[in-house]
Image (cartoon, grey):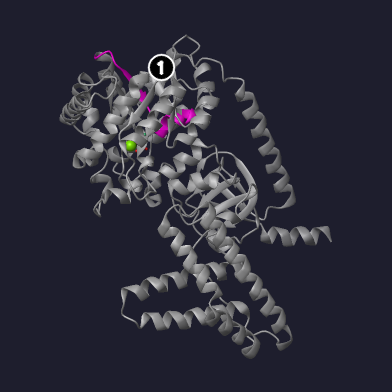
Amino acid sequence: MLLNLEKSKLAIMKKIRGISVSEGVAIGKAAIIQRKILHVSREHINAADTSKELSKFKQDIEIVIAELEHLIQNYAFSQDQKEILSTQKVILVDPEFVDRVNYLISEENCSRENAISIYFTEVADIFRNMDNQFFSQRLTDYEDVAYRLLSHVLKKGSNRLDSLNDKSILIMDNITPSFVTRVFEKKIKGIITVKGSRNSHSSIIARSMNLPMLVNTSGLLNEVENDQLIIIDGNNGEVIIDPLPEVLLDYENRYQQEQNQKETLLKLIDVQAKTTDEKIIKLMSNIEIPDELERVVKYNSDGIGLFRTEFLFIDREDLPTEEEQYEIYKQIAEKMSPEPITIRTIDVGGDKLSSILNLAHEDNPNLGCRGIRISFENIPIFKQQIKAVLRANVVGNIKLMFPMISNVTEIYRAKKIIEECKHELKDKAVEFNPDLPIGAMIEIPSAVVTSDAIAAECDFLSIGTNDLVQYILAVDRDNEAVASYYQSCHPSVLRSIQLTAENAHKRNIKVAVCGEMASEPIFVQLLLGLGIDELSVSPGRILKIKNEIINSSLYNSQLLAQKCLLQKTSAEVMELLN
Ligand code: PEP
Ligand code: MG
């Protein structure tokens, strides 16, 4: 009997491979939030079952209306969003809809999924034949309602944020950075996406929150259903669906071990990040949203090495004002004082396209109007941000950093604009601190090659390895199809880091790495050996990276880096690191 049970279980348990973005084990229930094609069965029901089906349909409507109300109360930020959701509620109580579905169930013995689908197909046909903008918007509303209702009835994909809880593993086709932060609030166990890549901004945020996440899991949506028990193995890059009892037990043990390791790492909170031969390494944090500050403080990091301010511009309908920015920067600077905070000017573009800046469509956004280029195209917005920073820096610990620098002339230009901002503030007698260290992100090959000239104009440099790898190796950081070409330890990347560090040191300025390479324990010794003074990492990685630093010697790190620099391929470098 037991044997039979195991055999049938064996047939059910499935494994799908993916790319691990944030290591760790998560065990939970699949919660699919996904617009996938819903397959509606056209089968009829027995006449005897129609009254049960009618009352189920009534309940479905009540549940979906409650869901919409919850969304309106808790998640609809703009008036437009509220109106769209309210319209959907009206559709659900429209007698034309309710009567028609009731008729199809009671008179034609349709199942409710079939009846709902027939009704919305009829409506869609009518709207499609009306050549009018208004009706095409109405069609979208109807399609949304149909999807919401059918996904509830079929218990398949849904749009329901409120279906998530502290047992959920969220499954989506792809996920936006802001959605990661919203689902994090639901205390979910982990995230799996079908698409996505390791260094997309969504992945970076999940990592910063220590949320196990797997991306690039093609085929997953055909294998999994809502509420199925699943495991994310973030260490081996696997998702396990319906695990066998002994597999589940094994992962429960691993999960517990991880929790114990985390407890052990907590003991390092007050330990200084210093190598065994006494080289102090500044260990800073990267943040995207002010909410992350709590974790930065909790893990006692030496400051903020990268504040990605573009997140203040994303998912909203108006631009943040100078005042709003000033308040946020001031609060963060005060909270971190006397430790430094490094504010990076907006870096929208790539996967961070912001609708409020009305950016034109670009066929090749990663080579288009990104980073400092956007600021130069929108000088009033750039100036607002700089003025907010100058004012907030009355606290005295802010540094300003520019993204996507390709050329020293961009630093000249940015510095000139900073001077203009200072004059304008002075003319209006607004208080500010003129002493603002400035730095360049080194993330474009041309900036590496001319880092001597750039270093001469800056107070610090910070290497953005996420983009540097993308641009040196000509591999889109968000394209899973070329993920195997994205090699952080390619010899060309190592030589670029070394050259940048050398040029910074010639000018007596410090050089940091704020790309995700700094958050990977395996690269810590290599980066120290290549001459990096500071590492800026996801807050969730601070203690892990500190553990690497305090167990390394600078001397050995330099020997390792020298050996790595002599290798010809990424594979050879990886072999040495392993
Ligand atoms: C980088 O490119 O490495 C970086 C830190 O910036 P972002 O990931 O925001 O492009
Ligand atoms: Mg970058």
Task: Work out whether residue 30 or residue 113 is closer to the camera in this orientation and state it.
Answer: 113
Q: Which residues are magenta?
A: 507-522
Quarter of the figure that contains the N terminus: bottom right
Total marks shown come to 1
Q: Residue at x 30, y 45 (%)?
A: 349
Q: Secondary structure at mark 1?
A: helix
37 to the left or right of 8: left
Residue 254 sits in quarter: top right
Residue sitting farthest toward the bottom: 107
Residue sitting farthest toward the front: 429
Residue 265 spot, x, y in % from top left: 60, 24
Q: Is residue 338 above or below residue 229?
A: above
Q: Residues within 10 Å of mark 1 (few under 14, many from 20)?
A: some
| Ligand 2 rendered quadrant | top left
Mark 1 — residue?
559
* 521 drawn magenta: yes
Instruction: Evaluate whether residue 41 shows in this view.
Output: no
Residue sitting farthest toward the right: 1
Residue 18 spot, x, y in % from top left: 51, 49
Residue 502 spot, x, y in % from top left: 28, 18
Q: Residue at x 43, y 31 (%)?
A: 286
Instruction: Evaluate whether residue 417 shows in this view.
Output: yes
Q: Is residue 154 above or below residue 381?
A: below
Residue 449 sits in quarter: top left
Residue 567 sits in quarter: top left
Residue 407 spot, x, y in % from top left: 18, 31
